[in-house]
Image: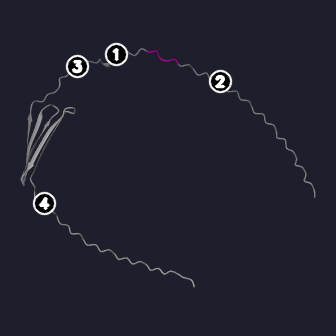
Amino acid sequence: MLYTPKYETPKYETPKYETPKYEEVTYAAQPYSFGYDVQDKESYTDFEHNEKSDYNVVTGSYRVVLPDSRVQIVTYKADANGYTADVKYEGEAKYPEYVESQYKSAASYAAPAYKAPEYKKPAYTAPAYTAPAYTAPAYQAPAAYPKY
């Protein structure tokens, strides 16, 4: 008697998904305050920023030193009516004075004094070709097979 195994097909149930419910989450405004400043002499970076907020109004200011050495100060306020900013400048713009270059112009230089290299014509000789000498191969007749 031969044994044959019996296999049952596995039964899978289709997963059931619920439609997600999206609700907009709103959080009450929180008061905050922060401030920072950066002064780096090597990169000439100098700025500052301060801001604070109560529940409805955000106020702050930032200050930055401009490349022309003036200081720009911006004071701002943001509330239900919008954003308003007051921009002020301190100091006077300074630009470096023009200084005549200490280097000579290209026209005042003399042409380089060097001798141009002399190139000789290459001395190639044509190779001498000779026709190959072939001799016909010498064939020997095969020896006769012995008779049996």
Q: CA distance from mark 1 to mark 2?
A: 46 Å
Q: Which residues are magenta?
A: 114-118
Residue hosting label 1? 109
Look at the image and tell me in which quarter the C terminus lies. bottom right
Instruction: Determine the CA span between mark 3 and mark 4.
Output: 64 Å
Q: Quick one: SS at disc 2?
A: loop
Label 4 sits on residue:
27
Query: Colour scheme used in the picture?
Result: one colour
Query: Would you say residue 116 sits in the magenta stretch?
Result: yes
Residue at position x 32%, y 74% from top?
A: 15
Is residue 71 depicted above or below 148 in this figure?
above
Q: Nearer the viewer, mark 1 or mark 4?
A: 4
* Residue at image point 17% right, 33% down: 67
Query: Quadrant location of the N terminus?
Result: bottom right
Whichever of callouts 4 and 2 sits on the residue coming sooner in the sequence is: 4
Q: Which residue is mark 3?
A: 100
Q: Disc 1 vs disc 2: Cβ atoms closer than 8 Å?
A: no
Q: Secondary structure at mark 1?
A: loop
Name the amino acid type tagged 4.
Tyr
Residue 112 makes an appearance in the image: yes
Residue 125 disc label? 2
* Three-letter amino acid code at the position of disc 1: Tyr
* Residue drawn at x 12%, y 32% as measured from the top left: 70
Residue 98 image position (x, y, % from top left): 19, 22
94 vs 106, nearest the viewer:
94
Q: Residue furthest right?
A: 148
Of mark 1 and mark 4, the one earlier in the sequence is 4
